[in-house]
Amino acid sequence: MAALAAALCLAAPAVAQDDAAPESWSDVDIVYLGEQHDNPAHHARQAELVAALDPTALVFEMLTPDQAALVTPGLIADQTAMEAALGWNASGWPDFAMYHPIFAAAPEAAIYGAAIPRDQARRVMDEGITDVFGDDAARYGLADPLPETDQQAREALQMAAHCDALPAEMLPMMVEIQRLRDAALARAALQALETAGAPVVVITGNGHARTDWGAPAAVARVAPDVTQRALGQGEDDTGPPDGTFDAIEITAPVDRGDPCAAFN
């Protein structure tokens, strides 16, 4: 996962930036706070912004709906108990100590999970993306093939993110799974908005927060009147994250060693 996070910032992006600082986005319906998953500074910034935005709901890429249903203000108050209840150590995500302050910044917010478990994602290969997503797959654009130029760009990004080590025949499926995760985040964000009201804050990787083809694009397709803003967070050795965002912030990098060593 660290290798993937490190490799996602590879190409110079086209950036649409908002003049307003993310702290001022409290009047926006859905705010996406992107991250490189293993960068503590990105999570600290997310926690700071969550405290400033005071969201009614938080949507986490890292949690399944079942996990999210376990979270209460009382559980948030006990970091150790919360980590155990969520089974975080077995999840593959980085240290829970980086994520807990985000929950603690808005302990009364409703918590939603948008994670697609690995076994469910693998079903895309046999059953197709629309069957795995279920109802409303067509509304979220999952029944339509991507334009060829977009498909090629996304496959190239997947290959680069995996250090050019993937078999080429795997790339279309990797793109489909990414589309599935984007749509799942969008659906969870809209459910949170409908149930809890604005503002909703989504905690996710930069790739899902990008406005050109991530979860914000899926929301715009389904609910074009919903207002959205997205923050992307990069590192000063690799630059801004790929894609378009309303604001981009750059932090010091994490020492990951050789991000491609795991593929050798």
Image (spheres, rainbow, N blue to C red):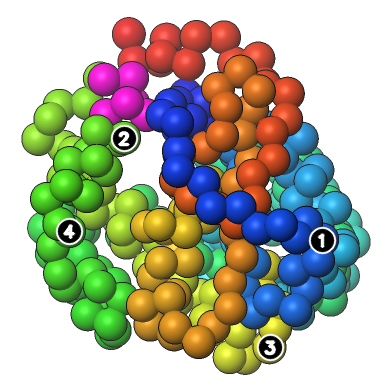
211 lies above or below 136: above
Nearer-the-camera pick, 78 or 150: 150
**Residue 60, above or below 165:** below
Residue beneath disc 3: 197
Q: Residues within 10 Å of mark 3 (few under 14, many from 20)?
A: some
Q: Earlier in the sequence, mark 1 or mark 4?
A: 1
Q: Secondary structure at mark 4?
A: loop
**Which callout, 4 or 2, points at the residue further toward the start of the chain?**
4
Q: Are marks 4 and 2 in contact (CB under 8 Å)?
A: no
Q: Is residue 222 above or below residue 22?
A: below
**Mark 3 vs 2, N-terminal side:** 2
Q: Residues within 10 Å of mark 4 (few under 14, many from 20)?
A: some
Determine which residue is flagged by label 4: 146
Tag in front: 1 or 3: 1
Q: Residue 172, image x and y in percent? A: 16, 45
Label drawn at residue 157? 2
- Whether residue 245 is visible here, answered yes or no, is yes
Numbered disc in front, either 3 or 4: 4
Magenta span of residues? 159-164
> Type of residue at label 3?
Gly
Type of amino acid at the residue the image marks with label 1: Glu
Residue 244, percent across and down?
48, 50
What element does badge 2 sit on? helix
In the image, what residue occupies the spot 29% across and 53% down? 177
Gap in angstroms between the C-alphas marked 1 and 4: 34 Å
First reached walking from the N terminus: tag 2 or tag 1: 1
- Residue neighbourhood size for the residue with mark 2, other residues' Cα within 10 Å, grouped as few (<14), some (14–19), many (≥20): many
* Quarter of the image where the C terminus is located: top left
Q: Secondary structure at mark 1?
A: helix
- Residue for point 57% across, 9% down: 257
User: How busy is the neighbourhood of tag 1: few (under 14 within 10 Å), some, or many (20 plus)?
Assistant: few
